[in-house]
Structure formats: structure tokens, C-alpha cells
Amino acid sequence: MSILDIFRAQSKQLFWKQLPARQVVNGGRDALIEDDQAYFVIRLKQMYLYYSRKLWRGYHPMLYCYVQHGKREDQAIAGPGQLKDMTDSDLSRVLLLNHRLVGPIAFMGEDVVLQVGLYSVPGEDIAKTLVGSLSTIAGLIAPGAAPALEIANVVKAGVENIAGLASTSLQLGVEDTFFQNNKLREGYYVGINAPAAMVNINQLWLKDDHLMQGAIASISQPYQGYDYMIIEIEKLDNRKDWPSLPEIAEFKQQFAAVLGDTNLTIEEKRQRISQLWPSFTNSLNESQHLVKPDREQIALSVTTDLKERLEALKTGNPFETRGWGEQSLETKLPADFDFIDIADRLDFSDPNSVREANRALSQPVF
């Protein structure tokens, strides 16, 4: 039996709604995530089991998450058993908050299918299965990057090992699809193991990362009546880890090799970079990991940086850089090239700057 068979066979439709932004104390958000303009991240904000002990056995929450967007599929599991060398009594003292499950994923306007399942798992089982899965994943990741499918299969097997146990119970299962009539928005989504008619959403609050209940936030108390989970959909306007993306990282050495080649004249270096540039911009335009604003930002920032380095090599002046939002300038050799040293150069409020970015993406600029 596959995880989807287990998920669909045992799940029951209970309470699942987005918490109104006004009921998130100090930080409610409800912005639309637009096609090719932003990324989304799925986080486990909090999960809770009403019954933590049945007779002599201790039970702990475990969450399974599956996300499909276009052809991309991601899976993740989260639970206190992810912490190694812990006994069953130790697990009862573990809080798991703000745990990133999936993302960042570039939103490209296609349907987003979100499946989340909250399980009740005996302590000895969750520790053994989760730690085993994580150890296997760690072995795949080091020393080189593992294929995504291998890691996904390990996650899937770990969930099935837990969900297939007779002592494991699916407390709450949700499948929600975001599409044209149910737009993807950032915010907090609450699932409660109770009939929807028994939950008054107007009396639910998110305060200090915990679900609270009360007529007003100031006198609300921790919600404890039923099992629940809080899933956050986070919107990211840009990603700072773009230099590590596989389709981009390979160009670091190529640009650096040209700039550092002492056998080439400045004009020859310019010509070599000009020859590399179409391949680089093609990688940006074809990347499934970047949205349009980041593609534009990277193209303009890299081309400006490379031009300034060529000019510094020509004049013999030092090259100053301010990367990744840093405030202070750092002096480096012009040939000492690294994407992480490149500062953002695109001003989206300036039409001329945007035009230059589009030109850098589509035309020869050297």
C-alpha cells in the first residue's frame, strides 16, 4: 500500500481554513503570490496532539507534507524523532516550530496541490523511523548532491514505514489545491481534528507561534480541545541563494578563468565573456528555480560587475565590491570573481534600470 493509498483511505474532512490576517498577532499577511513574480515556502508552524498518552504508551505528532507544482513534486516529514539519541520521555519535551518543509519554489501559475497529514505515532516508532530516514538522506547528500528522486523515495519510505504501523493513526488529513478560483496566498492555514461546525474561526488567534482561543487576543488561552496543525505558506520576493543553483554555479569558474587568465589582453577577455554571456542568460531564462524579477536582477548585476572588473583591470585600479546586502565596501583583485560578491544593481522603481536588465537578458551587452 502506497502513502497516497494510506492517506486517502484514512483521512477525514474536518476543519481547514486560512486564518484571517487580522487574527495573527504582530504580523498577519495575506498577499497574493503572483505568476512568475515570487516564490513560496511551506512551513510547519505548529502541531499538537490532544492525547499524548494512551494507557502506558506515549504518542507524539508527526507531519507528512506533499506538494506538487507543475511537474515538480516535493515531500517532507517532521516530528520530534528527528532529534537523535532521544528516549520516549525526552520526545515529550520537544517543541517543533517554524519548521521548513518545502521550498523555496518558483511559482509559475500552475496548480499547487498541497497534502498534509497529522499522525499520532508511538514514541519508540517515530524516533526509530524518522532518525533512520534522516540518516539515509544524510548519506545521500554527502559528499556530493544526491538526485532529488532518491531523496524523495527515502522520505516516502520513511512515511510509509510509520503510516503502515497498526499503532499509527492519521488524526487529520487535508488535500487543498490552489488554482484560478482558489488563488495561492501567503498566510497561515489551520487544520483541526474537529467538525467544522464546532470551530469558531473568529475566536482563533496565532500568538507567539501558538494557536490561541478567545473572544479577543489579549485574553486568549492556548487551544487544547483537539489535535491541530498550523501550516504557513510564506511568500519570498527573491532568493539570495541563487549563486548555488546548479545551472548558475558552473559559470562562476568560467567567468573567473577568463578574468584571471594573464595570457589574454583586456579586449580578449571582453570577447571571451561576450561569448559566454548567451549561454549564461539562456540558463537564467530557462531556470525552473528563478522568477522573472530575480532573472532580471541577476542579469543586470552580473553584467555590471563584470564590466567594472574589466575596467579595473584596464586602469589598474582596485576593485571594490559590496555583496549580498552588505553595507561596507571590500577591496578585491578584479580577477577574484565570485557570484556571492555581486551586489544588487537593479532598481525596480527606475524604468531605465528595468530596461537595462531586460536588455542584459536578451541581447549582447559586451
Image (spheres, rainbow, N blue to C red):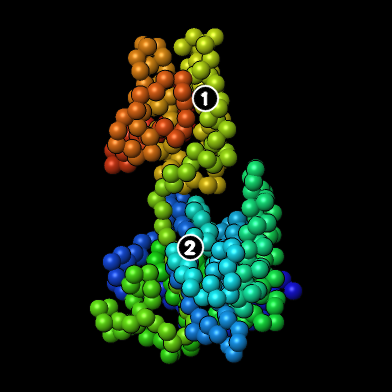
Label whose residue precedes the other's in the sequence (1 or 2):
2
The image quarter in which residue 303 lies: top left
The image quarter in which residue 166 lies: bottom right
**Quadrant that contains the C terminus:** top left
Give the SS element for disc 1: helix
Residue bearing mark 2: 99
Image location (x, y in percent) of residue 337: 47, 26
Residue at the image point whose x is 32% and y is 41% from the top: 348
Residue 262 horizontal side relative to residue 162, left or right: left
Foreground residue, 270 or 85? 85
Image location (x, y in percent) of residue 116: 55, 71
Image location (x, y in percent) of residue 61: 54, 75
Mark yes or no: residue 148 visible.
Answer: no
Residue at the image point whose x is 49% and y is 38% from the top: 243
The amino acid sitting under disc 2 is His
Image location (x, y in percent) of residue 352: 31, 33
Vertically, is 301 above or below 88?
above
Vertically, is 307 above or below 71?
above
Closer to the eye: label 1 or 2: 2
The image quarter in which residue 325 lies: top left
The amino acid sitting under disc 1 is Phe
Residue at the image point whose x is 55% and y is 66% from the top: 78
**Quadrant that contains the N terminus:** bottom right
Q: How far apart are marks 1 and 2 (CA)?
A: 37 Å
Residue 349 horizontal side relative to residue 304, left or right: left
Do tag 1 and tag 2 residues touch (Cβ < 8 Å)?
no
Residue bearing mark 1: 255
Vertically, is 5 above or below 82?
below
Mark yes or no: residue 128 visible.
Answer: yes
Neighbor class of circle 1 (other Cα within 10 Å; few <14, some 14-19, many 20+) is: many
